[in-house]
Amino acid sequence: MSRRPPRRSVLRGLAAAGTAVIGFDPFTRSWAVAPSDRPLHGIPDLDGTLHTDEASLSAAADDFGHIVHRRPAAVLRPGSVADVVAMVRFCDRRGIPVAPRGQGHATNGQAQVSGGLVIETTPLDAIHPLGPGSIGVRVGAGAKWSDVAKATLVHGLTPPVFTDYLELSVGGTLSVGGLGGQTHRHGAQVDNVLELEVVTGAGELLRCSPTRHRDLFLAVLAGLGQCAVVVGATVRLVRAPETVRHYLLPYDDLRTFVEDQRLLVGDRRFSYVEGQIVPDAAGAFRGYVIEAVAYGPSAGDVPDDTALLRGLRHDPSGAEITDMPYYAFLDRLAPAVAALKEAGLWAYAHPWLNLLVPGRRVAEVTGRLLDALTPDDVGPGGVVLLYPLVREHLKTPLLRMPDDPVPYLFAVLRTTPPDDTASVRRLLAANRSAYDLVRAAGGTQYPVGSVPFERADWRRHFGSAWPRFAAARKTYDPRGNLVPGQGIF
């Protein structure tokens, strides 16, 4: 559990720096840091602090995408869940828009808010101790998945599903879905939540689960922040392996590649299955690599390569097989991320494309998209992913999936210089065209990327889930103040 300085010392330091907010001016609709001749609405007593300094506002007006920049009026760094309750209630009564922000890994301004309040959830990072026979772990919304994994592995336990990049907040991924290479076995991260603690748009603190406030529970998981702010979650745990065997299996044909992926998730011989597509010497995206992992319960176990690879049509001469500790596998992107940051590429714009394609059309549709793709469209350090999910394990209504037993995630994780606005516009337009092609084939988007969307698009996206989603929004955020950056309502 994180330790924080006493509230009094925090407030004293901020007051000395001239950044503490003392009230809200209803006439200018701005936060005040000094007394005014006009009557101010005094802010609630807080354990944390509100900030209006340039550094705080500029940081909250940016994200990992570096494409959209909406400047808030103030940033809350809560010292407790009670702070979130108090400030959401304060903002609700005054029509001030609110958006929670975790690690700021959004790519299209989703967690930004013009003239409103950004709530940084990073201070809410507590990971509660596990009791005997625990089947779940209670964590704060600001906890990073890397820290959750480390805390549970001490007890030989682990969440069953991780995104490839571990330095994301629990609240952030639960608001969008949380897909990864284990999803074909266990569903998304949202399918492995036992309970949520949330603050509704009206400022009510509630616990919800499949049996308690079920409508709210289902409206928050993959609900893009539209009904409540996640402040805590209880995440399901399973027995953790000690070691893994990691396979990289090369292919030179797209159809064979996706068919073998489908075989692997169908017979569940691997615990993790993903896939990458890389350019060849001529720059065409025609190199395919299945990434598969077999978990071992103890360091002495040796997976049977012959059994695991039986029936696959990869090029065996190019296969790479590596044994590693379980956490080293989970955190395998850390060196690459460090290298991107060192090279300055982390600060590039990231107009990402994330689509969900019906398995019956995946070779045809992604083949068309890949034929048109160039290295410049992906950019330095960019990645192209294609891997299967299993529909029967994806049970969260708002995580919209194609009507297909084995949908595929197709992702083009692009990078481009942020000051090259022409390239950013071109890539955003390409994202929309790709989405339109996939939608015509019965697919949808995984809404973590940068696809230009209108409100009518969102209605179509949520489809049959829309009426209940809209009803939950009206019930739990009746003034519509939460997360306007998504552009849904």
Image: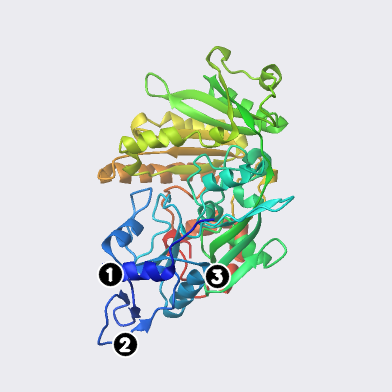
Q: Is residue 298 visible?
A: yes
Name the residue rendered at 46%, 59% in the picture. Answer: 123
The x and y percentages for residue 448 are 47, 49
The amino acid type, in three-letter code, at marker 2 is: Pro
Asked if residue 99 lies left or right of residue 213, the reply is left
Q: Is residue 445 visible?
A: no
Name the residue rendered at 54%, 42% in the picture. Answer: 163
Instruction: Give the spatial CA distance, label 1 vs label 3.
Output: 34 Å
Name the residue rendered at 45%, 73% in the picture. Answer: 87
Asked if residue 372 lies left or right of residue 317, the reply is left
Q: Quadrant of residue 376?
A: top left
What residue does disc 1 label?
16
In this view, the residue in front, 339 or 214, is 339
Image depth: mark 1 or mark 2 in front: 1
The amino acid type, in three-letter code, at marker 3 is: Thr
The x and y percentages for residue 459 are 53, 59
The answer to which of marks 1 and 3 sits earlier in the sequence is 1
Question: Which quadrant of the rendered structure holds the N terminus?
Answer: bottom right
Bin the neighbour count of mark 1 within 10 Å (Cα to Cα): few under 14, some 14-19, many 20 and up. Answer: few
Q: Quadrant of residue 246?
A: top right
In this view, the residue in front, 454 or 169, is 169
What residue does disc 3 label?
200
* Image: 68 above or below 39: above
The answer to which of marks 3 and 2 sits earlier in the sequence is 2
What residue does disc 2 label?
39
Bin the neighbour count of mark 2 within 10 Å (Cα to Cα): few under 14, some 14-19, many 20 and up. Answer: few
The amino acid type, in three-letter code, at marker 1 is: Ala
